[in-house]
Image (cartoon, rainbow, N blue to C red):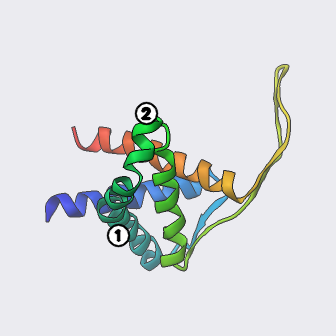
Amino acid sequence: MKAFLRAILINLLVVYLVDAVYPGFSILHDAKTLITAAVIWLLLNKIVKPIIKLFLLPINLITLNLFSWVVSLITLFLLPLIVSGVKISPYDFPGFNYQGFSVPPFHLNLFLSFLVASSFLNLFHNNTSAIIDP
């Protein structure tokens, strides 16, 4: 039970951080939606993700696990369908200039927005888990 609550709190922190960092990922800031999203994200990662990995095992073996990002993308696609307060939308990056370093503005369509949100969720989850669970 203690490990389950720790996992929920880690997912709660991760979902909140991704909402704060990436504007294409938005979630309602009430306790019910945040906790529901954290619990559903935990269940998707612990139950649904292994099933999807099993179905995609031949493709992952052929591509030497380069196709594994699709599994994270599918689980993230299920999150807004289940939790009504979570929304992933296209994002227009305004560009960036700093001391001669320039990144031009560009548009992230819905697929790329899902990919960026999935990457942020996995990155923050791995780092937060490494800090909290030694």
Q: Nearer the viewer, residue 104 or 52?
A: 52
Query: Residue 39: x and y, percent?
Result: 35, 69
**Residue 54 relative to residue 79: left or right:** left
Q: Tell me the residue at 75%/55% (across/down).
A: 109
The Cα–Cα distance between marks 2 and 1, rounded to whole angstroms, is 31 Å
Using the image as rendered, state which of residue 24 and residue 20 is in the foreground: 24
Say which quadrant the C terminus sits in: top left
Estimate the x, y position of residue 91 in percent, counting from the top left. Answer: 75, 55
Q: Earlier in the sequence, mark 2 or mark 1?
A: 1
Please give the residue where the numbered disc 1 appears in the rendered image: 39
Amino acid of disc 2: Leu
Disc marking residue 74 = none
Residue 96 visible within the image: yes
Camera-nearest label, 2 or 1? 2
* x and y, in percent, of residue 97 in the image: 83, 30
Q: In the structure shown, which secondary structural element does the residue marked by tag 1 occupy?
A: helix
Residue 23 visible in this rendered orientation of the protein: no
* Residue 62 falls in image quadrant: top left
Q: Which residue is mark 2?
A: 64
Provide the secondary structure element on which disc 2 rests.
loop
Quarter in which the N terminus is drawn: bottom left
Q: What percent of the width, then of the height, locates residue 96? A: 81, 35
| Left or right: 77 in relation to 104 | left
Label 1 crowd (10 A; few <14 / some 14-19 / many >=20): some
Work out whether 26 lies above or below 73.
Answer: below
Neighbor class of circle 2 (other Cα within 10 Å; few <14, some 14-19, many 20+) is few
> For the point 50% across and 60% down, which residue is it?
74
Q: Amino acid at mark 1?
A: Val
Residue at x 41% of width, y 56% of height: 13
Q: Is residue 36 left or right of residue 85?
A: left
**Residue at figure coordinates x 37%, y 58% from the top left:** 49
Residue nearer the viewer, 45 or 2: 45
